[in-house]
Image (spheres, grey):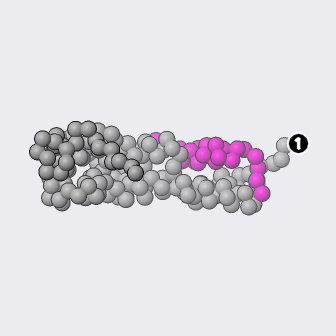
């Protein structure tokens, strides 16, 4: 027969001598999340809602954090763009992720224009990293095109890069 292990220092329910943990507020929870990485307002709201906090308490906490400069959607969006470009994602994928985080379309457009990224080179580098530089048959070119499209690169860029193999003269 197994015996239950008891956590030392944890009292039984109703035991007044047991140390009690203070309940975390929505502000504390959100501040802890922001200490790890940037979060958008929408993302913080969702996490606080899942944590069981009241909507009013969550909204007040987010407003307070924003007022103190701890939460900033602009800073979040810039960090997300840098991160995703560094991971090799294209503009369509980044745009979709920013929109899903509640970033306005005008701000998204501005961020992508100011990203100082050569999307063609980034796509070519991703293709080389994944598949190498060997030329491919039509089925393989289609797989490569799908890979780039899933990563969020423009169809025109994908077409240029995946058909370049077919048009390259063979080395003798």
7 shown above or below 103: above
Quarter-of-image position of residue 69:
top left
Q: Nearer the viewer, residue 81 or 154?
A: 81
Q: Is residue 129 left or right of residue 98?
A: right
Q: Is residue 126 left or right of residue 166?
A: left
Q: Nearer the viewer, residue 128 or 29?
A: 29
104 shown above or below 170: below
Residue sticking out furthest to the left: 16
Give the number of callouts.
1
**In x, y percent, where is residue 31?**
23, 42
Name the residue rendered at 19%, 48% in the picture. 12
Q: Is residue 133 magenta?
A: yes
Asked if residue 8 shows in the view, the reply is yes
**In x, y percent, where is residue 100?**
37, 59
Q: Secondary structure at mark 1?
A: loop
Q: Is residue 16 magenta?
A: no
**Segment colored magenta:** 116-137
**In x, y percent, where is residue 91?**
48, 53
Name the residue rendered at 26%, 45% in the picture. 72
Q: Nearer the viewer, residue 114 or 148?
A: 148
Residue sticking out furthest to the front: 1
Name the residue rendered at 40%, 46% in the picture. 80
Q: In which quadrant will I find the C terminus?
A: top right
Residue sticking out furthest to the right: 172
| Neighbour tally class for label 1: few under 14, some 14-19, many 20 plus, Cα within 10 Å | few
Asked if residue 63 shows in the view, the reply is no
**In x, y percent, where is residue 50?**
28, 58
Q: Nearer the viewer, residue 96 or 110?
A: 96
Q: Is residue 3 left or right of residue 129?
A: left
Residue under pointer 1: 172
Name the residue rendered at 24%, 47% in the picture. 30
């Amino acid at each position: 027969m197994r015996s239950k292990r008891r956590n030392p220092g944890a009292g039984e329910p109703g035991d007044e001598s047991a140390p009690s943990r203070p309940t975390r507020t929505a502000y504390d929870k959100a501040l802890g999340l922001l200490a790890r990485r940037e979060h958008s307002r929408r993302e913080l709201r969702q996490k606080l809602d899942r944590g069981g906090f009241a909507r009013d308490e969550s909204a007040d906490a987010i407003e307070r954090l924003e007022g103190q400069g701890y939460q900033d959607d602009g800073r979040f969006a810039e960090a997300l763009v840098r991160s995703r470009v560094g991971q090799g994602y294209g503009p369509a994928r980044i745009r979709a992720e920013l929109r899903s985080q509640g970033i306005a379309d005008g701000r998204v457009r501005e961020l992508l224009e100011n990203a100082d990224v050569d999307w063609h080179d980034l796509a070519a580098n991703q293709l080389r990293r994944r598949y190498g530089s060997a030329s491919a048959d039509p089925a393989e070119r289609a797989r490569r095109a799908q890979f780039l499209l899933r990563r969020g690169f423009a169809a025109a860029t994908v077409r240029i890069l995946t058909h370049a193999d077919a048009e390259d003269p063979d080395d003798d």
